[in-house]
Structures are given as C-alpha cells and as structure tokens.
Image (cartoon, grey):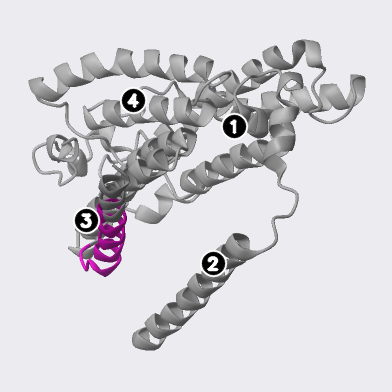
Amino acid sequence: MPLLLLLFDTILLTTLIGLAIAAVLSAEPRSAVMLFIAFGLWLSLVWARLGAPDVALAEAAIGAGIGGALMLSAARRKVRRDSGGDPSHEPSGCDASGDPGGDPSSNPDNTAGEEAQ
Amino acid sequence: MNRDLALLIGILVSLFAALLLWIFYATLVGDPVARLGPLALEQLPASGVSHPVTAVLLNYRAYDTLLELAVLLVALLGIWSLGPAPSGFRPAGPALTVLANWILPLAILTSGYLLWVGGHAPGGAFQAGALLGSAGVLLRLAGHERAGLPAEAAQRWLVVAGVAVFLMVGLLLAAFGEGFLTYPKAVAKWLILLIETAATLAIGATLAAAYVGGRPPGIRSPCPSSESPSSGNPSSGHARS
C-alpha cells in the first residue's frame, strides 16, 4: 500500500512541476493562463494530499478559480490591444448609450460561451 | 535590452528559488525549536471556535487577516482607478443561462455553508467570499453587465464592509475591552462570526468587481451623456479618473 501511495505522490508531483514549467514556458498568454489554472487545481490536490484542506479550498477557489478568471480576461484584453482594436472604444463605459463598440454582433468581447467552458 | 531584462529576471528568480530551498532545508534539518502548533491547539477552547485554522486566522493572528482584507480593497481601488469598466458580454445562450440559473443559488447557499462551517471544520470567510465572487463572475459571463453587484454607492459600502467591521470591532475592543482585537471569551464566537460575515460579503463583492474590471458605472459618470454618442475624444473620458 505505501508503494502505491508513493507512486501516486510521484505522479502528483511530476505532473505539478510539468504544469508549472509548461505554464511558464508557454508563449501565448491565453494558453499560459489555462495551464496556470490547471496548475492551481492540481496544487489544491497536493494540498489535500498533505492534509491541509483549508489551503486546498482556498487554492482551488481563489488561486485557480478567481485568479484564473481575472488573468483570462487580462489576457483577452491584451490580445485585443495587440491586434489593434480601436482604443477609443475599449474602456469607454458609455457603450450603453449606443457606442458602436458595444454592438453585440461585432464586439470581440463576446466570447461568453467559450470562456465559461 | 529585452534579452538583458529576461536574463536579469531569470537570475533574480533563481536566487529567490535558492533562498527558498535553503529555508526549506534549514526547516527540515534545523533543531526543532518550540513550535507554535501545540500552543495554538492548547488555547483552542479559549478562542471561540473549534477549528484551529480559523482560530489562528480570526483570533490569534486577526490583524493579519485584517491586512489581507485591506490588500484586497487596495487592489480593487487600483482596478477602479484604471478607468470605467468595459462593456459586458452579450446575453448568453440558453445553455449557459440555465446553467447559471442552477449554479447561482447553489453557490450562494454553499458560500453561506462554508462561512458557518468555518467555525469547526475547513471553510471560512475567504473561501465563502471567493465562491460568492465566482457567482458574480458567472453572472458577468452570462451577460449581466454589473455581475450582480448593486449600484455604485452600495457597491462602495459593500467593498469596505469587511475592513470597516473588522476595524470597528477591534477599536471598540481596544477602547472598552482588553485590547485591539482581543475578544472576550464569552462573545468571541459571535464577534468572529460577525467579522467573517462582513468579510465574506466584502470579499465576494471585491472579487466580482475586480472581474468587471473597472470603475462601476455610477451617478458621477464622466461620460458626457448628452454629447455625441461616439465619445470621439478618448482623453475626455479619463479626465476625472
């Protein structure tokens, strides 16, 4: 049984380090963030294995969940800025009053379904 | 130049990693000095909660948690100072809408459970608040522009509620009790629950607002609403930010 547990721990740790390295080396922000989210979830497994369910909960909820969502939206904004989206439309906040940037059919923001996966 | 910077960052990170490894090594082989664990467990009955982690976070090291809440608040202020929030997503399709309708009440319920259970089992304000915040993120993704948050004025009150209640309890205890955040044993549980409830609401609102990603559209919006809708001059939109 300890041998099986040792095998489990080894897989857990090597996958964790592999995810970390892949997230750091990934060139594209979006895939880096996704790898980071996977890393966070995996890390919460490691915390649970270490008998620290409090830290595991916090890591899964804040580190992977909210942090991942924040970084995904940051990566999306960076991509939009890099691709030369008209900057005057972007953070205007007045879109409700008929700003063309708020047009739901053309706004590159509208990846809701995709983001929620 | 960019390459030099990358090299510098690499060197600094390596040094930091070496430092961490050294600390780890020192902790492993160093002489086992008096550890705080037994002391914390010993004082547990006096802390007002029966879960040691919550006792440390909300009682023994309460100012630490207070400062964490302050850090969250400052982070949100930084995000708000960057300008107004970008417009939201278009309303989601039926699948995501139904999913959100199912998950949202469950998330709110689970958050309340995590808050309550934190007194005697793993849980607590940060986890509960993060769950509330993720409910806000889901709402925003499903097309609700404000992520379920109230209007700007109420949102500001919500966001400072955690730090405010925490500080108020601390100052009242300092004035009429035994010292800053030194709970009297009889009411420790209820004070902790009060602080944690306020902190949960504040953390949830802060995280959701952070995901919205900009100052909420408020009464004092800098947008010239009667001007041309295209707001041709981008600098005017940031004049008062």
Task: Classify mark 2: residues with Cα within 10 Å, few (<14), some (14-19) or many (20+).
Answer: few
Q: Nearer the viewer, residue B4 or B156?
A: B4
The chain under label 1 reads: B
Which residue is painted at 59% across and 32% down in the image?
B53
Task: Classify mark 3: residues with Cα within 10 Å, few (<14), some (14-19) or many (20+).
Answer: some
Residues under numbered marks 3 and 2 in contact, where contact means CB atoms less than 8 Å apart: no
Residue B85 visible at all: no
Assess whether residue B43 is covered by the magenta stretch: no
The image quadrant of residue B191 is top right
Residue B166 visible at all: yes
Task: Classify mark 4: residues with Cα within 10 Å, few (<14), some (14-19) or many (20+).
Answer: many
The chain under label 2 reads: B
The amino acid pointed to by label 1 is Val
Residue A54 position, x and y percent, is 48, 33
Which is the main secondary structure of the residues drawn in magenta? helix
Q: Nearer the viewer, residue B138 or A108?
A: B138
Residue A46 position, x and y percent, is 37, 45
**Residue B150 horizontal side relative to residue B29, left or right:** left
The chain under label 3 reads: A
Q: Which residue is mark 2?
A: B20
SS class, disc 2: helix
SS class, disc 1: helix
Q: Which residue is mark 3?
A: A30
Q: Which residue is mark 1?
A: B53
The amino acid pointed to by label 2 is Leu
Residue A20 position, x and y percent, is 31, 60
The image quadrant of residue B39 is top right
- Numbered range of the magenta stretch: A11-28
Which residue is painted at 26% across and 69% down in the image?
A25
Which residue is painted at 48% across and 71% down in the image?
B17
Quarter of the rendering occupied by the N terminus of chain B: bottom left
